[in-house]
Structure formats: structure tokens, C-alpha cells
Amino acid sequence: MPILSFLVLPQAGAMEQLCADLSAMEHCEIIPSDNQEVVVLVTDTPDEKTENKLQEMLKNLPSLQSISMTFGHNAE
Amino acid sequence: MKLNRRAFIKSAAAGSAIVAAGSIFPGISFAGWQQQEGASGQISWQKAPCRFCGTGCGVLVGVSGDRAVAVKGDPNCSVNKGLCCVKGFHSVQALYGKDRIKKAQIRRNGKMVEVPMAEALDVIAAKIKETMEKHGKDSVAMYGSGQWTIPDGYVASKLFKGCLGTNNVEANARLCMASAVTGFMTSFGIDEPMGCYEDIEHADVFVTWGNNMAEMHPVLFSRMLASRKRKKNVTIIDFATRTTRSSQASDKSILFKPSTDLAVANAICYEIIHNDWVNWDFVNRHTTFHKGKTNIGYGTEDHFSFTDVPEDITFEQYKTFLEDYTPEKVEKISGVSAKDIKYMASLYGDPTKKVTSFWCMGMNQHVRGTWIQNLVYNIHLLTGKISTPGNSPFSLTGQPSACGTVREVGTLTHALPHGVVMNEHDREMAAKIWDVPVTNIDPKPTYHTVEMFRALDRGDIRFMWIQVTNPMVTMPNLIRYRNGALKDDRFIVVSDVYPTPTTDVADVILPATLWIEQEGMFGNSERRTAHFDRIVPGPGDTMSDTWQIIEVARRLGFQKQFPWGEDEYIGKIWEEYRRFHDGPKHNMASYEMLKERSGVQWPFVNGKETRWRFNTKHDPACKPGTDFDFYGKKDGKAWIWARPYEPAAESPDQEYNFWLNTGRVIEHWHTGSMTRRIPVLHNAMPESYVEINPEDAADLGVVTGENVKIISRRGSVTMKASINGRGVPPRGMVFVPFFDESYLINEVTLDAFCPISKQPDYKKCAVRLEKA
Ligand code: SF4
């Protein structure tokens, strides 16, 4: 049951789109910065299979420029 | 309760991201975040350096009971400022693979049988003694690792060099860092980078030389991208032989033909001089010009030896030498357009821009590895862009303690914790600190890594103890060295945490503790030493590599040299070791301070870390009255080298018409022996593959997922094709990651090496392809 957190940077000018894209994804909660183009993303998935699928979707988001992990928890 | 705990963990996850954002984007605010106070006290957090690359991120390991369950980036660690990559976050799961080696094993009648630890240690000690009596002191060897902790490497060196009297101590860092060392020694007379990671926030331009940082140093790459986002005027140039994730995120990707980085670096220097972008004040006061031997060979034959003979030259002679490297001439050799060469030169030459160059294996694993380091230093020296914030030629390390344990402790055949075995004064210092007769320390180096495995094959070495590394996957031209290790009358001891192709050739296997199951220290790329406590217990009979060596040393009669108790030995070893580095050029922090902080940089002088060496403003070791002092050289001046372009040891021809390039992927650490046991990482990248250019794939008639046979003069391997995957090689090149022991790509590679550093070139040999 992984819980992860990330810092996500949008592509140039795509902050709003990124927030919309991430909010629409299951298992994702976001905390956008109010003064910089940076989003905190917390993911909470029921199992690793779902987690892998979610990671794949994140990698392919056109509004996303880079994603860096800051926290991980994976105990049963 | 369970829900509470989950809410608490989610709140902690958000909190650590917000803290990380705060140190990367000063002044950032998240007004919408409500910190949730949930259940607490169920997870306790302890600091450690991550062990899965040379970046040296600080992590906080969350422990529940006696099990490590979570990881977060340590916001107090200036390396990563709270960030963490996918390997770092999953790292604790490497402790809990189902097939952990928990008991010692000895080969009896061809079968491995479990034995008590004490019995295995008795056998090892007896075998060392017997082999030395029968075949001489240099018939026994220790082969260690840049993943050894500092105490591991220190006691190995003390036992073998100080007590047993053989210089047969090498480490796998020879395969990853040796050219970086000889590059520093030849250009500056002293090892390790002058700059630090803070250069990332100061630089305006980054040039990455053959360095896929997005996958290999992901946290540093994130810091670069964050700096570009924050400052807006930052340019990242990816200068490489294939297109990777780093190329995609860079502002410009420039591809060069293998080995021609030498020619391009010279062409950049030609342009800097031609356009009078030279910082004459700096060059006149702080540099001298030199040349060395040329046509220096490739080391593919046994007993190969080479010694460079440096000669002084004038600036005018250097300028004449560069006439062969005009951008137009180099375009023909390198495939890089003269326009792009001029563009790169203009970035380095612009006095208003601060430039940082990063590199790692692309420049190190290179048959002219020492030369290419010299040439990139030349660029920074000619422009005076060195040793100041943001101006940094920065050699990154691959392993968590290649710097700390191998380069600083000196676990290579020629080295001592301070200096080299050839130097009488250095031998005397070692003998005094180690409490051994100075005559014990042999003034002659023995075998560098490739030659050590050749010696094992020939029978010059009969006993080898391998710790924290997996050479039966990583040695180039592997078939010869595996057959050598399997010969009768060779005795191989392997200390490891999981079964590997190296434990397959072992006569004794010792179960080792892993990472935070023991206390230790690592030293990262930016001269930072980081301490970690024993945070969780190791399983079964596992024992730290340091303690294994101490146990064997005592059995061999060296109680006096290894007197420490099990509850104190790491602190005692550290305090003994740091006597070697006493002085302003390399002073190290005390044990107490290391325990307290998330890493401390050396030179650590008068309670202060040194961020930029050789710069009088920052480095107390510099002579007063000058702005820069390259004190590794007697006259305080750095060397600019005339080094030519020379081709690889083996280039594609009619029969073997492709380049083979090998390397890593973000999910896996080295040979995958740990990360392939982490389900998430294994599932994300379950097996190795061969990247082929789409046009070559079409010619061959293969599509992604179909099998291709890669054949060299030494061996072959059949694996699935990847076309337009995360990496795309140019036409005429294939790329294979080496993490997967089911596809031993090193049976195909060539054991050619840089004649100065003796580091093999894993990036360039000739192969042909067949559809399988
Ligand atoms: S970048 Fe390297 S040191 Fe940092 S978390 Fe990732 S693997 Fe560990």
C-alpha cells in the first residue's frame, strides 16, 4: 500500500493544465504552490500494480516537465 | 487506528515534499496546505546516506519495530534538500529479499554446505596462510568496492598492505573512477573535485559530457532543472553518444561519434584561443603547459605496462598543436557540426556566464579516460572558470563511497590512506599509524583490477576475497575471467547479501550485513563524508564486512593491529584513519560530528567545511596572498595538457559493424543483485534489452520485443530489441544495460583500458547483430 510524495514541475505555462490533469487522476492529491510553478503530489495506491500503472501515466503527462520523489512508505 | 496512521503517513509525505520545495525554491508558499496532526510515535526516523549511487543523498529511514518501512529525503542534507529518487525511496526493501544469504557456506565435494560463521572464518585464515607459504605473499588478493564502507576498506588495506605485506588490494572503483583520479592527479596533483553541488544553483550553463544524469544522478538532475525553472536563463547542453532522457530534458542535445570527445574538447580550446576568450590573467598566474606520450596502446595484452613522460611546452607550442583541431576539421572526425562546436566554445568563452561541466562513466570508461579529463580541465583553466561558485569542472562518482573508501582510504594497489606505496615518507606514516614494521609495506604496486583477474587466470594469484561487488557480471571480457576463477587450485571467498554469479564461483560464502544493518560511513562525489548507525538488525549470522576482516586478521595473529571491541570499532577505526589526513588539505570531521550531521565536507578546518578548494577565499590550505593556489602541484599551478585524439581500441569494421555501448538504467543499481529483489523496481524494469536505432532495426527486420543476437570477437548474447524506447542510439550503435545477470553483456565487451588509469572502456567495442 504505497504512499509517495513528489515535487512536480509543469512544462512552461502549463501549471493550470498540470493541476487539472493531476486532480483528475485517481489516487492523487495535490497541493499547488501559490507563488511558484511547483506542485506537491501525494499518491496513495492500494497495491504495487496500481502504483506502477499510475507512475506510467504520470510519466506520459504532456503538461509535466519533471517529477522528483521526496517520500515513500510501503509497509503492509 | 489504521486509518489514522495512514492519514498521518500521508501528512508526513506531503510535509516532506513541502520542506524539500522550501529549500529548492526559497520563499515558496503552499497556502492551501493544512498540516494534519495524526497518530504519531509509530515510526521513528534515523538519518543515513543512500547507498544506491555516488550522489550521496541523505535519507531518513522510518523504522517500525525492528523493520525499516519508509524512506524520506533528509531536508537537513544539503546534497538533496529533501529530494529522493525512485531507488532511494525503495532502498529499504533491498534488505528483505526472500533469498538473503544468512549463513556461511563452504564448498565440499563440489556442493555448498552451511557451516557456522566461526568455521568459515577459520578456513579463510588458514587458506590465506597456506597460499602465502606455498606461492608467496602476492598470491593472495582482496577485491573490494566503492560500496565498501570507509571502515571496510580501511581494515582491508591495513590487513593486506600493512600486516600481510602484499599490495594486492583493488576495488571495483577501478572500473568506474580510476580515470577521474589520474585526471585530477595529472592536471592538479591532488584528487577529487574542487567544487561542490552548490555549483548547481550558481551556474548559468551546464554541459554534461557523456553523462545521462536524468537516470544516473537523478536528484542532481532535478536540482539542475529546478535551478533552470527558478532562474530562467539557465542552459543545459547534453553532449553524448546517444539520445537519452537527459537529452530530452536539456535545451540542446549534441551527439558525437565514440571517442571523438577528445577532438571536440580540443576544438573548443582552439576556438577559445582563436577568439581571444582566454582569461590571460588566470592562465599566466595559475597554469603551465605540458605534453605527454602519444600512441600509448590499449592494454589488451597480459603484463601491459605504460608510464607517461611529461614534457614542458610553451603556450605557442600548445597553440600550434591545436591547429589540427579547428572546428571544421573536427566536424569530419566527430560528426559534430562546426557550428555546434563554436556554440559550445562560445558558452565556455562568454565571461558573463558561469559554466559547470558534469561527467561520469562516459569520460571515465574510456581508453583515453585520463586524457579526456585533462582536456575538459583545459577548457575551464583557459577561461579561468574553476574553483568559484558555479564555475566547476565536476567529475561525478558512480558509487556511494568510491571517493570515501577507494580514493580517500586508498584501496587500490598503488595507494595508501595517505599517498602511495612508492613513496618512502607515505610508507613510514602508514607503518607508524598501523603499528607494523615499515619493511612490511612493499614499495612496488602489484596488479590493477584487470591484471589482477588475469593473474588469477594465469595462477599468479591463487586466493581472492571479494567483498560487496559482483565481478562475475562486471568484468569486461568476462568469459576469460570466469574460467580463471573456476580453475582448480584457485580459492575464492565471497562476502555478499544475495546469491550472484560471483557467489557461484565461490569456495566460501560469508553472509554480510547490508547498509543500515551495520554502522559505517560513505564518502560521496563532493568530498562529503556521511555516517550511518546500525538502524535495524541483520538477519541470521550476517556480519559486517569490516568485522569479517577483523576476525580473519586476528586468526592470522594480528590482534595488536585490530584490538577493538564490537561495540566501539567503527568509531575507533575512524579516529585512527583520520590521522592520515591531518592538515588543512584534507582534514576530516570527528566521529562525534559525523554522527550528529547529515554529512560533512572535507577539508574540514577550524570547524568549517571547504566548499571550493584551491580558491583562497574558501580554502584555508591556499597560500595567503594569492587568489588561487593549485597546491597539489609543487609550484601551485595547474597543468594544461596537449593530448591528441586517438581512436578506440576496437572500432566497427566490415565484419563487426556496430559500436556496443553499455551502461545503467534508473531503476537498477549496478548488477541488479539488490534492486532486482525490490518488486517495484524489478517490475518496472524486469529484464535487460538492446537499444537499436529504428533505421538499423528496419534493415535488420526486427521490431521491439524480438530477439537480436549481439556478437563480438569474445562472445555473444541474445536479447530483446528496444526501438525508440527511453534511449535511442545513432545508426551503427547499440546500447545494452548491464544490470541483468541473465544477459551477461560483459561476455561481449573488450578488456581494453586507459594505459594511465588502467580503467576499462565499457562504452566502445565492435559487434555485429543477427536477428535471432
Ligand atoms: S540520486 Fe542516488 S543517492 Fe540520491 S536517492 Fe537516488 S540513488 Fe540514492
Image (cartoon, rainbow, N blue to C red):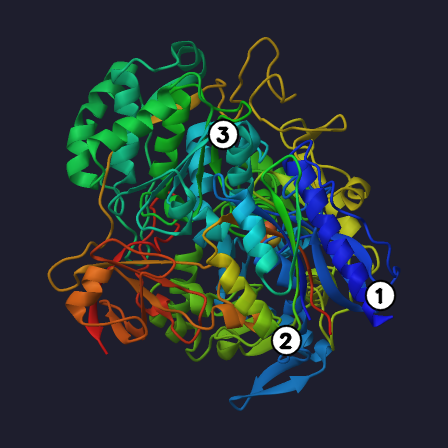
Residue B97: image tag? 2
- Give the mark toward the camera: 3 or 2: 3
Lower sequence index among marks 3 and 1: 1
Q: Amino acid at mark 3?
A: Lys
Q: Where residue B557 sits in the image (x, y, percent)?
A: 71, 63
Please provide percent x and percent y for residue B605: 71, 27
Q: Secondary structure at mark 2?
A: loop
Q: Is residue B187 above or below residue B8?
A: above
Q: Are marks 3 and 1 on the same chain?
A: yes
Alpha carbon of mark 3 to alpha carbon of mark 2: how far? 44 Å
Q: Residue B336 at x, y = what percent?
A: 23, 38
Query: What element does badge 3 sit on?
Result: loop
A35 lies left or right of B320: right
**Label 3 CB less than 8 angstroms from ligand 1:** no
Which quadrant of the rendered structure holds the N terminus of chain B? bottom right
Q: Nearer the viewer, residue B343 or B600?
A: B343
Residue where numbered disc 1 is placed = B4
Which circle's residue, 2 or 1, is located before the other in the chain?
1
Residue B154 vertical placement versus B673 (above, below): above
Q: Residue at x 47, y 73 (%)?
A: B686
Q: Chain of mark 3?
A: B
Q: Position of residue B507 (x, y in %)?
A: 54, 79
Q: Residue B262 is drawn in which quadrant?
A: top left
Of badges 2 and 1, nearer the viewer stands 1
Three-letter code, disc 1? Asn
Quadrant occupied by the C terminus of chain B: bottom left
Question: Are discs 3 and 2 less than 8 Å apart at CB?
Answer: no
Q: Residues within 10 Å of mark 3 (few under 14, many from 20)?
A: few
**Both marks 2 and 1 on one chain:** yes
- As drawn, the label of residue B232 is 3
